[in-house]
Image (spheres, rainbow, N blue to C red):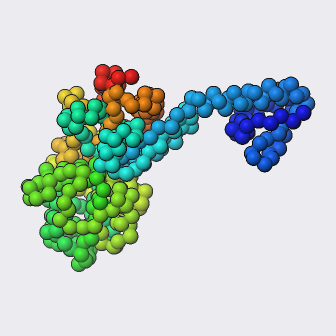
Amino acid sequence: MPVTISPAAVIFLQHSSHLIATRKACNGPVHPTFTQGATVLISCKSPIRFAAVAAIAVASTFAVGAQATDITGAGSSFVYPVVSKWSAAYAEKTGNHINYQSIGSGGGIAQIKAGTVDFGASDMPLDEATLSKFGLGQFPDVIGGIVPAFNVEGVAPGKMVLDGATLANIYLGKITKWNDPAIAKLNPTLKLPAAAITVVHRSDGSGTTFNFSDYLSKVSPQWKTKVGEGTAVQWPVGIGGKGNEGVSAYIKQIKNSLGYVEYAFALQNHIGYAVMKNAAGNIVKPTIANFQAAADTADWKHSKNFNLVMTNAPGANAWPITATSWVIMYKQPKNLANAKVAFDFFKWAYEHGQEQARSLDYVPLPPSLVQQIETYWKTEYKM
């Protein structure tokens, strides 16, 4: 006797564990036949046994469906590579899906303020006045590095040296060619072209821009007074790309270009990146160890709402443009069920996502900071 079950149940019957249960109940193999409308007819020797199997499959479908939750986040493109990996692993583990849009920190801040997403992500921390006005809290999720990225023929990744003053003067439009004496002095062994530098920056509101411009403000008095820092600034020169993705694409396409991106984007797009002279005067590479060296200088215990920027950090090996990404959520969630899944996702990431983070050259948060964050959740969020 054929029994008709829902298309959703078919998915579960096709899953190995459900097939095993079905075979046992039928005392033998099962033979699904698909008909129009995605209905399935399955026959086995005992109609009673099969009816029980079908009921189990349907019940499983509704049980999993009831438990699974889709939540939304938006913002930082800096953090997108690792959030993408975390989301896939978390969905496989729990069935809950994190739909994250890489739209830039400015967009993420705007969307969480508007309440259109369950969490925002930004590489610029919100100040106390903004957090209080909108009833928001924020906490770090990962630390990484921003690198000057370039496309200069004959110069391999990691072979060009830049310092803060030179980088600022390029973005101020004072240095316009690759063979400028300031660049040549830092790179005496490189054959630099007498070609114009195409400067690339972000066109959207960006936490990567905030950290980059904050760094330039710390190393260049002229940059600080003329341009300053922010998620969006009035760029003296250059062309704009949307997201780390857009800047990376421009650098890859345009010869003799220079931009700034999160390190994982430089690696994934196979574009050149510079090593840098840091605050201690040492030339350092963009490595997870050197991002960690900068992170080690951070005094999180005395930073209210985790508002701490670590650009131009002291330390012999500290990478000078090291950045934090923050998660921003309502202290009184608009959707309590979704908020609980979001907190569970980040707790899972802290406990189980370290290897994914390291594989992309991000710095996982230290256990002491994770403990501080979880205490913050309990005291600041109304769950």
Q: Residue at x 37, y 29 (%)?
A: 333
199 up-or-down from 46: above or below: below
Residue nearest the viewer, comparing 376 with 275: 376
Q: In the picture provided, is 138 more to the left or to the right than 299?
A: right
Q: Residue at x 31, y 45 (%)?
A: 110
* Residue 163, visible in the rendered structure: no
* Residue 372, visible in the rendered structure: yes
383 up-or-down from 76: above or below: above
Q: Quadrant of residue 184?
A: bottom left
Residue nearest the viewer, comparing 323 with 132: 132
Count of marks, rendered view: 0
Q: Quadrant of residue 119?
A: top left
Residue at the bottom extreme of this rendering: 194
Residue 136 place in picture, x, y as percent? 29, 33
Q: Residue at x 40, y 50 (%)?
A: 102
Q: Residue at x 33, y 62 (%)?
A: 241
230 up-or-down from 91: above or below: below
Residue nearest the viewer, comparing 119 with 211: 119
Residue 330 place in picture, x, y as percent? 33, 32
Look at the image and tell me in which quarter the N terminus lies: top right
Residue nearest the viewer, comparing 315 with 172: 172
Residue 93 place in picture, x, y as percent? 55, 34
Residue 101 place in picture, x, y as percent? 42, 48
Look at the image and tell me in which quarter the C terminus lies: top left
Q: Quadrant of residue 185?
A: bottom left
Q: In the picture provided, is 378 more to the left or to the right than 306?
A: right
